[in-house]
Image: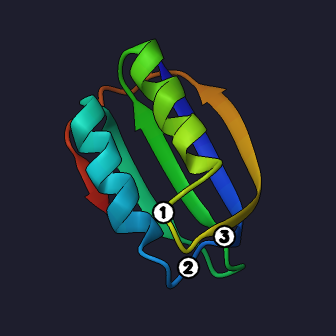
Amino acid sequence: MRQRVVVHGRVQGVLFRDSCRQQATVRNVSGWVRNRADGAVEAVFEGEREAVEALTAWCSRGPRHAQVERVDVAEEQPTGERGFEVV
């Protein structure tokens, strides 16, 4: 499955992207994560349903210093992502 998530709140400058990459690697989820100009973090997760859903759930908490206000989630068609990168 593939999900696109946009995480709102205090999520930049708190190691959100690197922590997300680590969480994705542990769960064997492919995709990418990036900061957006509006202060949010956007990511695409692709992999087994349970792993993708677990990573999306992690985004609602984020790393220790994050203050997540809202997570928008949209399912998409898988595209065959390989690996996970911070862009």
Give the residue pinned by disc 2: 12
- Residue at the (56%, 32%) spot, across then down: 3
Q: Nearer the viewer, mark 3 or mark 2?
A: 2
Image location (x, y in percent) of residue 14:
49, 79
Q: Quadrant of residue 48?
A: top left
Q: Is residue 43 left or right of residue 19?
A: right
**Looking at the image, which residue is at 30% across and 26% down?**
80
Amino acid type assigned to the residue bearing label 2 in the image: Gln
Q: Counting residues from the N terminus, which is met first, the one under dot 1 or under dot 2?
A: 2
* Amino acid carrying mark 3 in the image: Ala
Q: Mark 3 to mark 1: distance in Å?
A: 14 Å
Residue occupied by mark 3: 40
Q: Is residue 14 above or below residue 41?
A: below
Q: Which residue is mark 1?
A: 63
Viewer-proximal residue among 81 and 69: 69
Amino acid at pointer 1: Pro
Q: Specify whether residue 87 is in view.
A: no
Q: Give the spatial CA distance, label 3 vs label 2.
A: 7 Å
Residue 68 position, x and y percent, is 70, 62
Q: In the structure shown, which secondary structural element does the residue marked by tag 3 occupy? A: loop
Q: In which quadrant is the C terminus drawn?
A: bottom left
Q: Is residue 84 above or below residue 52?
A: below
Residue 21 at x, y percent in the picture: 31, 54
Q: In the rendered view, would you say 23 is above or below 17? A: above
Q: How many marks?
A: 3
Classify mark 2: residues with Cα within 10 Å, few (<14), some (14-19) or many (20+).
Answer: some
